[in-house]
Amino acid sequence: MQLNLNKMPVKDEDLKTIAGFENLRKLNLSFTQITGTTLNELKNLKFLHTLSLSGTNLKSADLAALKGLPALKA
């Protein structure tokens, strides 16, 4: 299952809802209003292997929340 939210009005609080899609394999959050403060909400997406975050206001330190994703490759 994949979800493309590229250029959609997605905010940090929406990640909790997205995390409910536990079989998600691809997620595109590029050019959204994500800041990275709630990226840890995605830690339960054990099948997520591709995550796009281009054009967001993330800082490199925010990416540490993604370390626990076992299938994440890109």
Image (spheres, rainbow, N blue to C red):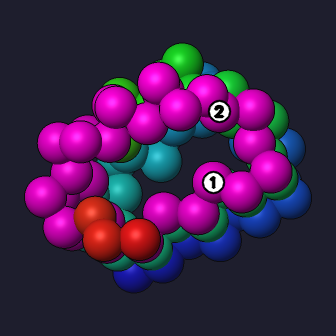
Please tell me whether residue 51 is drawn above or below residue 57 in the rendered image.
Answer: below
Residue 25 image point, x, y percent = 35, 74
Disc 2 crowd, CA 10 A, few/some/many (<14, 14-19, 20+): some
- Does 65 appear above or below 9? above
Q: Amino acid at mark 1?
A: Leu
**Residue underneath mark 2:** 58
Quarter of the image with the N terminus is: bottom left
Give me the disc on residue 62. Answer: none
Question: Residue 62 versus residue 16: which sits nearer the camera?
Answer: 62
Of callouts 1 and 2, the N-terminal one: 1
In what quadrant of the picture does the C terminus appear? bottom left
Which residue in the rendered view is the most extreme toward the top? 37
The residue located at (17%, 42%) in the rendering is 68
On screen, residue 69 versus residue 66, left or right, reads left
Mark 1 closeness class: few <14, some 14–19, many ≥20 residues within 10 Å: some
- Residue 41 visible, this orientation: no
In the structure shown, which secondary structural element does the residue marked by tag 1 occupy? loop
In this view of the protein, can residue 33 be seen by the observer? yes
Q: CB atoms at circles 1 and 2 under 8 Å apart?
A: yes
Task: Decide whether residue 6 is among the magenta residues.
Answer: no
Q: Which residues are magenta?
A: 43-71
The answer to which quarter of the image holds residue 7 is bottom right
Q: Amino acid at mark 2?
A: Leu
Residue 69: x and y in percent read 21, 51
Residue at the image point whose x is 63% and y is 54% from the top: 53
| Residue at the spot of label 1 | 53
Task: Look at 71% across and 57% down and name the residue there.
Answer: 54
Distance, label 1 to label 2, CA atoms, is 8 Å
- Up the image or down, 73 lies above or below 65; here it is below
